[in-house]
Amino acid sequence: MELCCRAGAAATTSLAWSNSISPSLHSLLHPISVEYLSICHTKSSIRVLCLNNNGTNGSNTQSQKGNQMIVSITGATGFIGRRLVQRLHQDNHRVRVLTRSRSKAQLVFPVRDFPGIVIAEEPEWKDSIQGSTAVVNLAGTPVSTRWSNEIKKDIMRSRISVTSKVVDLINNSQDDLRPTVLVSATAIGYYGFSETQVFDEQSPSGNDYLAEVCREWEGRALKVNKDVRVALIRIGVVLGKEGGALAKMIPLFMMFAGGPIGTGKQWFSWIHLDDIVNLIYEALSNPAYEGVINGTAPNPVRLTEMCEQLGNILGRPSWLPVPDFALKAVLGEGASVVLEGQRVLPMRAKELGFSFKYPYIKDAIKAVVSEK
């Protein structure tokens, strides 16, 4: 998203772009992450669940301490996962982190700040999932990189393998210890790309690679036991201070190097970090939250407008664009994720009465910039 060279420096333009673009791409893409698109902004596979004080599995009923939940989360050390764990912990729910790296998870969730949280490596996932009330699946390799055949396989495999493992563990749990809720992340990449169409939860899937990834991803989650309520959250570009698009873009704008990618006319379907965490949190506890739910704010904008708002709030220009060929030089086929976009509306969330804290991009950006 940044451009380090000025007009007239044609001989050095390509090199400067390639050195400066790639850091910003990670944030825009993840929302499947993109980070979580951002396809999202999740990184290693981690689950957060809560164990009894003695470290053993608890009952999957919420009668132990009123409405206290025991939540198991994959991708807990990622951008969204970290904030979700914080929220659950603050509200005195019991958390189990399912991870492939105990040491990494312990750095993110030190005992002094998160007493009582259980960190379980892969051989312990079975015991952690049994007895939990809910599972949140946020795992997946970031898509913000140059796509080789092997990387494309890994993008698919990372989502399918973790989701399949979690679903199998839920299905193989004893009936009285089986979680009753699975909230599984997916992405707005499901819909494909368009400058003219408007997508909601009833819209068909696209026909590109990322749409295929999302279809497979969701399909595996839906293989869970029929007695388990499933909410599939199709996440847009997540905005926050500690990750996602804005965390990468703010420094670029501060250096007077910010601006839209490509034409700037592509739609930017975004959501503030607090709102996506609140949506997941609500899906855990509210039985009405079932099926596909778009995790995007109700007012998507063109990328140019988003950059203008960010520039105005930071007091920096937003006119310096990154042309298509610069992105393609860095990401190849993967550049399509940010060169194209989709206008996605959260119709189901609105039907359910979900209240967005940040429905407008200006307020969301202000909140992120002022966050300490």
Image (tube, rainbow, N blue to C red):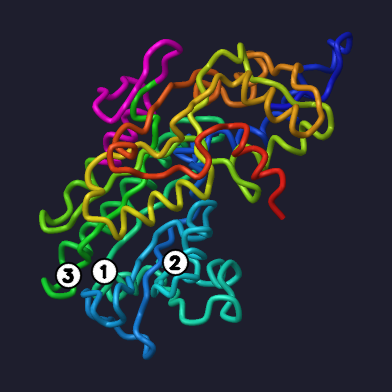
- Residue 169 in the image, given as x and y percentages of width and height: 23, 64
The residue singled out by tag 3 in the image is 173
Residue 88 is tagged as: 2
Give the residues drawn in magenta, as a range: 193-218
Q: Is residue 207 visible?
A: yes
Please tell me in which quadrant of the rendered image residue 217 appears.
top left
| Left or right of 289 on screen, residue 144 | right
Q: Amino acid at mark 2?
A: Leu
- The quadrant the N terminus occupies is top right
Mark 1 crowd level (few <14, some 14–19, many ≥20, 10 Å Cα)? many
- Camera sees residue 38: no
Q: Where in the figure is residue 154, as x and y percent of width and height?
A: 42, 42
Q: Could you tell me which quadrant the C terminus lies in?
A: bottom right
Q: Is residue 84 left or right of residue 265?
A: left
Q: Residue at x 15, y 66 (%)?
A: 172
Q: Amino acid at mark 3?
A: Ser
Left or right? Give the position of 200 relative to 3.
left
The reply to whether the magenta stretch includes residue 200 is yes
Residue highlighted by disc 1: 133
Question: Which mark is first along the chain, 1 or 2?
Answer: 2
Task: Reply yes or no: does residue 54 show up in magenta.
Answer: no
Name the N-terminal-most of marks 3 and 2: 2
Label 3 vs label 2, nearer the camera: 2
Residue positioned 52% across, 42% down in the render: 35
Residue 156: give its label.
none
Secondary structure found at label 1: loop
x then y, percent, for residue 178: 18, 69
Q: CA distance from mark 2 to mark 1?
A: 13 Å
Q: Residue 361 versus residue 86: which sits nearer the camera?
A: 361
Residue nearest the observer in this picture, 305 or 131: 305
